C-alpha cells in the first residue's frame, strides 16, 4: 500500500537551532501540505507545498520561520527555523491526489506519521 | 472563516457501549466532511462524506452527514479498548485542498 514517510519521527532540539523535516510519498500526488499540532490541540495548516515554486502560507505562518521546499511530486521538506519552546509540536505532512484510483484517489487527504519536535 | 466544532470534548465509556460523536461546521463552498482517528501521531482516515443522508459504514463504525443542518455524527457500536483515540472531524472546501479541523473528541474505552 502507498505510504507517506516522514523523518525524523522525533527529535529534541536546542532553542535557536533549525531542523528540517522530510516527507516522502511513494506515489505521485498533486498536493502536499504541512500541518502543525501543538500539544493538546487539533491540526492547523501551515502551508501548501507547491512543486517548483514558493509554498502558499496560511495566516500566522511565514516563509522565514517555516521554509518549505517541494522539488518534485513525491518529496517535500519543512524547516522550522530559529526554534523556541513554543515550536514544540507534531509536524505532519499530508498528501492528496485529485485523480486516479487507490489510496490517493478523489479528494481524500492522507497523513504521514508525523515528526514530534521538542525544543529545550 | 471556516469553522468546525466537535462535541463532546472527551468521553469515557466501558467496553461494549455505543458512542456518538458530533461534528458541526460552517464552511464556505462545502465539498466534503472527513473523519479521522488519531491514536499516537498520524491521523488515519475513516470516512469521507459528501452527500446528506447516506450512511457510510465500516465494521462497528458508521457516519452520516446532514448538509441542511450542517453536522455529522460518528457512531461506534460495541466499543473496544482499541477504539480509544482522538477522533477528528474536518471539512474540505470546494477548492479541495485544505482541511479545517475541529478540536477533536478524546474517547477512552475502559475494559
Image (cartoon, rainbow, N blue to C red):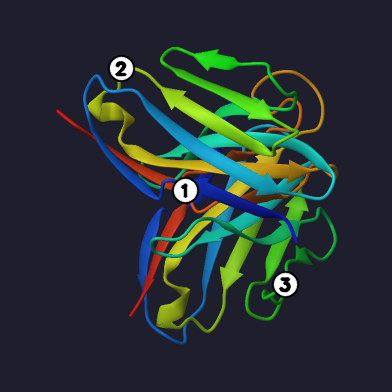
| Vertical comparison of B32 with A118: above or below | above
Q: Which one is nearer the viewer's eye here, A58 or B84? A: B84
Distance (Cα) linking label 3 and label 1: 22 Å
**Residue count near mark 2 (Cα–Cα under 10 Å), binned few <14, some 14–19, many ≥20:** few
Badge 3 vs badge 2, beta-carbon distance below 8 Å: no
In the rendered structure, find residue B78 and report the number of the disc placed on it.
2
Q: Which numbered disc, 1 or 2, marks the residue that appears first in the sequence? A: 2
Distance (Cα) linking label 3 and label 2: 42 Å
Marks 1 & 2 on one chain: yes
Q: Which quadrant of the figure has residue A28?
A: top right
Q: Nearer the viewer, mark 3 or mark 2?
A: 2
Q: Is A15 situated left or right of A93 in this image?
A: left
Residue located beneath label 3 in the image? A59
Q: In the structure shown, which secondary structural element does the residue marked by tag 3 occupy? A: loop
**Residue A98: x and y, percent?**
81, 32
**Residue A114: x and y, percent?**
47, 51
Q: Is residue B24 visible?
A: yes
Q: Which quadrant of the figure has residue B91?
A: top right
Quarter of the figure that contains the N terminus of chain A? top right
| Rendered residue at 56%/34% (across/down) | B35
Q: Nearer the viewer, mark 3 or mark 1?
A: 1
Amino acid at each position: 500500500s502507498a505510504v507517506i514517510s516522514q523523518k525524523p519521527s522525533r527529535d529534541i532540539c536546542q532553542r535557536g537551532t533549525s531542523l528540517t523535516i522530510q516527507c516522502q510519498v511513494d506515489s505521485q500526488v498533486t498536493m502536499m501540505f504541512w500541518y502543525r499540532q501543538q500539544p493538546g490541540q487539533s491540526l492547523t495548516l501551515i502551508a501548501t507545498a507547491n512543486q517548483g515554486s514558493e509554498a502558499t502560507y496560511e495566516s500566522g505562518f511565514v516563509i522565514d520561520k517555516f521554509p518549505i521546499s517541494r522539488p518534485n511530486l513525491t518529496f517535500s521538506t519543512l524547516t522550522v527555523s530559529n526554534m523556541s519552546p513554543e515550536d514544540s509540536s507534531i509536524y505532519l505532512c499530508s498528501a492528496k491526489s485529485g485523480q486516479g484510483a487507490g489510496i490517493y484517489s478523489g479528494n481524500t487527504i492522507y497523513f504521514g506519521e508525523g515528526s514530534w519536535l521538542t525544543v529545550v | 472563516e471556516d469553522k468546525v466544532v466537535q462535541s463532546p470534548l472527551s468521553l469515557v465509556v466501558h467496553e461494549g457501549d455505543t458512542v456518538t460523536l458530533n461534528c458541526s461546521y460552517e464552511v464556505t463552498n462545502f465539498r466534503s466532511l472527513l473523519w479521522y482517528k488519531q491514536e499516537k501521531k498520524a491521523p488515519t482516515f475513516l470516512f469521507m462524506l459528501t452527500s446528506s443522508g447516506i450512511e457510510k459504514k465500516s465494521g462497528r463504525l458508521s457516519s452520516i452527514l446532514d448538509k441542511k443542518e450542517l453536522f455529522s455524527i460518528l457512531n461506534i457500536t460495541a466499543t473496544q479498548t482499541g477504539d480509544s483515540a482522538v477522533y477528528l472531524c474536518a471539512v474540505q472546501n470546494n477548492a479541495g485542498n485544505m482541511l479545517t479541523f475541529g478540536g477533536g473528541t478524546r474517547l477512552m474505552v475502559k475494559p
